[in-house]
């Protein structure tokens, strides 16, 4: 479950890094901010919740299962889980989500915060892309 969840999240973050954010950057600030506000509301759905939450829960459980001896590939599994938990989950919760909330709170004046949001959010998304991709690869090596 962990490798699939991490892989799904890596693909989503990759799509934002290479297509969604560059496309929004080309729009006038008010349109880019409004589109991102809509994306941020739309993504909060059960399918995303299962993928993001499932990968997180699986990565929390993996080190425990390794510790109690019910999962092999110890160092690989723990490393993959930590990559995801720190570089993806934590970055999302501490970085991207608060920025999303600030953009949402700006409402129709989102264009005022958009340039800083776009730069910072995209940079942290690149981190999530790299770490979730690395987590997927490392967890796959443990199989």
Image (cartoon, rainbow, N blue to C red):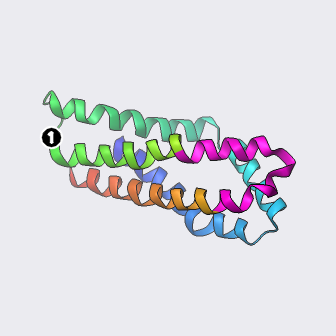
Q: Is residue 122 magenta?
A: no
Residue under the image location 56 percent in, 64 percent down = 17
Q: Which residues are magenta?
A: 95-118
Query: Which structural element holds mark 1?
Result: loop
Residue 15 image offset from top left, x and y in percent: 56, 62
Tell me the quadrant of the picture where the N terminus can be found. top left
How many numbered marks, from 0 up? 1
Front one among 127 and 71: 127
5 sits left or right of 45 in the view: left
Q: Is most of the magenta stretch helix, strand or loop? A: helix
Which residue has dot 1 on it? Answer: 72
**23 with respect to 122 (left or right):** right
Look at the picture and state if 82 lies above or below 115.
above
Residue 108 picture location, percent across and down: 86, 49
Question: Which residue is at 59% across, 56% downward?
Answer: 121
Q: Residues within 10 Å of mark 1 (few under 14, many from 20)?
A: some
Q: Quadrant of residue 2?
A: top left
Front position in the image: 4 or 34: 34
Residue most toward the left?
69
Can see residue 67? yes
Q: Residue 119 appears at what percent x and percent y?
A: 62, 63
The residue at the point 75 percent across, 49 percent down is: 37
- Up-down: is 138 above or below 82? below
Q: Residue furthest top?
A: 68
Closer to the camera in the image, 121 or 22: 121
Query: Is residue 34 something one can see in this rendering?
Result: no
In the rendered view, does 140 fall on the left or right side of 8?
left
């Amino acid at each position: 479950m962990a490798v699939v969840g991490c892989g799904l999240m890596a693909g989503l973050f990759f799509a934002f890094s290479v297509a969604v954010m560059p496309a929004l950057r080309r729009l006038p600030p008010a349109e880019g901010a409004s589109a991102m506000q809509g994306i941020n509301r739309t993504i909060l759905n059960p399918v995303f919740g299962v993928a993001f939450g499932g990968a997180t829960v699986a990565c929390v459980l993996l080190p425990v299962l390794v510790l109690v001896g019910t999962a092999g590939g110890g160092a690989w599994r723990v490393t993959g889980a930590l990559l995801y938990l720190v570089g993806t989950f934590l970055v999302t919760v501490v970085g991207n989500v608060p920025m999303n909330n600030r953009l949402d709170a700006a409402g129709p004046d989102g264009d005022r915060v958009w340039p800083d949001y776009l730069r910072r959010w995209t940079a942290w998304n690149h981190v999530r892309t790299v770490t979730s991709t690395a987590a997927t690869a490392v967890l796959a090596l443990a199989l």
